[in-house]
Image (spheres, helix red, strand yellow):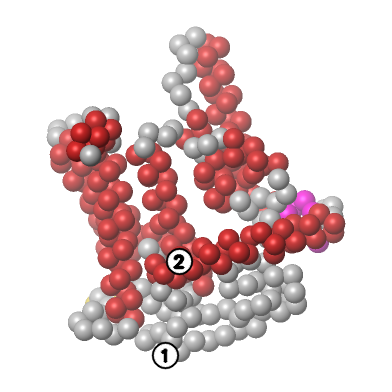
């Protein structure tokens, strides 16, 4: 194991990336355990407050990312060991920031709400992408182009095609397929060709009710696929999220309870899947924390 690590990680110059990934995972796990203990009011675990201001851990994350990033720029050409240390500091900061990604996205405290699951998704994406880079997988299947002009043009066109396919796949609501396709380009072809998810921008623009050319049959087919195939996968994903981050719908020590809200005419389930039935299937849960 030591020989493999030295050959594949240290020998290839990926030690800083390894330190970043390790710090990211360890900090994220520690942070989630810490906030769950705070939520349960266990022992001395408490929020960080300055007067009446609750200081979210994203603040510490931004500071650590700035420190680690600038220090990395300074030490990159001096010492590989110090460069790896700064990468670890950057990883700690990135974990703290991504753990409250939903707060940044919504500009409000949604840590213990359904929207707060976005933070877990953001961390999982960061870990998956970093792990692939650590294994030496290059995004978009990029390889060093041939020195000839024809080789450079071919590489540029291939990169552009993959970018277009990635954008189409993401617009169709297939986030994980699009992200995986950055490293396995054949998945981008599958994602770009297949039918869009019913709640995606592509569906709203091209075949959903209210679009320029509504196509009820295509929309019904998309909804059927969503119910038949996507919901079981999303339920499994939510189970993993709740194992990692805790149940979002438990009473919060900050909010003092759980508030439910009625769904809309084209309701949205608690698992983020568009519900074609009136009123949806679940109410929205709100809360505070972090």
Bounds of the magenta span?
203-209
- Spot occupied by residue 133 in the image (x, y as percentages of width and height): 38, 39
The residue to which callout 2 is attached is 241
Whether residue 49 is situated above or below residue 148 in the rendered picture: below
Helix, strand or loop under label 2: helix
Helix, strand or loop under label 1: loop
Which residue occupies the foreground of this view, 134 or 80? 134
- Spot occupied by residue 84 in the image (x, y as percentages of width and height): 20, 42
The residue to which callout 1 is attached is 256
Whether residue 250 is situated above or below residue 71 in the rendered picture: below
Whether residue 203 is situated above or below residue 35 in the rendered picture: above
For the N terminus, the quadrant is top left
In the image, is residue 199 part of the stretch drawn in magenta? no
Which residue occupies the foreground of this view, 135 or 82? 135
Say few, some or many: other residues with alpha carbon within 10 Å of mark 2 (under 14 / 14 to 19 / 20 or more): some
Which residue occupies the foreground of this view, 219 or 234? 234
- Spot occupied by residue 69 in the image (x, y as percentages of width and height): 26, 46
The mark lying in front, picked from 2 and 1, is 2
Whether residue 233 sits left or right of residue 239 in the image: it is right
Whether residue 239 sits left or right of residue 23 in the image: it is right
List the single residue furthest toward the bottom: 256
- Spot occupied by residue 224 in the image (x, y as percentages of width and height): 75, 61
The numbered mark at residue 23 is none
């Amino acid at each position: 194991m030591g020989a493999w690590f030295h050959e594949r990680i240290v020998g290839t110059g990926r030690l800083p990336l390894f330190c970043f990934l390790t710090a990211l995972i360890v900090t994220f796990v520690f942070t989630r355990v810490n906030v769950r203990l705070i939520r349960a009011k266990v022992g001395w675990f408490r929020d960080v407050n300055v007067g009446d201001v609750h200081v979210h851990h994203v603040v510490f994350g931004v500071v650590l990312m700035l420190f680690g990033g600038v220090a990395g720029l300074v030490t990159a050409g001096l010492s590989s060991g110090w460069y790896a240390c700064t990468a670890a500091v950057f990883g700690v900061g990135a974990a703290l920031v991504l753990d409250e990604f939903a707060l940044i996205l919504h500009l409000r405290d949604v840590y213990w709400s359904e929207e707060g699951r976005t933070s877990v998704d953001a961390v999982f994406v960061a870990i998956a992408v970093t792990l692939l880079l650590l294994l030496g997988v290059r995004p978009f299947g990029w390889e060093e182009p041939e020195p000839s002009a024809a080789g450079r043009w071919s590489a540029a066109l291939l990169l552009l095609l993959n970018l277009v396919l990635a954008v189409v796949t993401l617009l169709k609501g297939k986030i994980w397929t699009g992200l995986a396709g950055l490293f396995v380009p054949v998945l981008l072809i599958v994602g770009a060709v297949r039918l869009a998810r019913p709640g995606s921008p592509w569906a709203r623009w091209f075949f959903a009710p209210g679009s320029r050319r509504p196509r009820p049959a295509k929309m019904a087919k998309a909804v059927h696929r969503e119910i038949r195939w996507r919901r079981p996968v999303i339920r499994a994903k939510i189970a993993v999220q709740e194992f990692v981050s805790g149940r979002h719908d438990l009473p919060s020590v900050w909010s003092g309870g759980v508030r439910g809200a009625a769904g809309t005419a084209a309701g949205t389930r608690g698992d983020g899947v568009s519900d074609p039935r009136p009123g949806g299937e679940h109410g929205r849960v709100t809360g505070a924390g972090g």
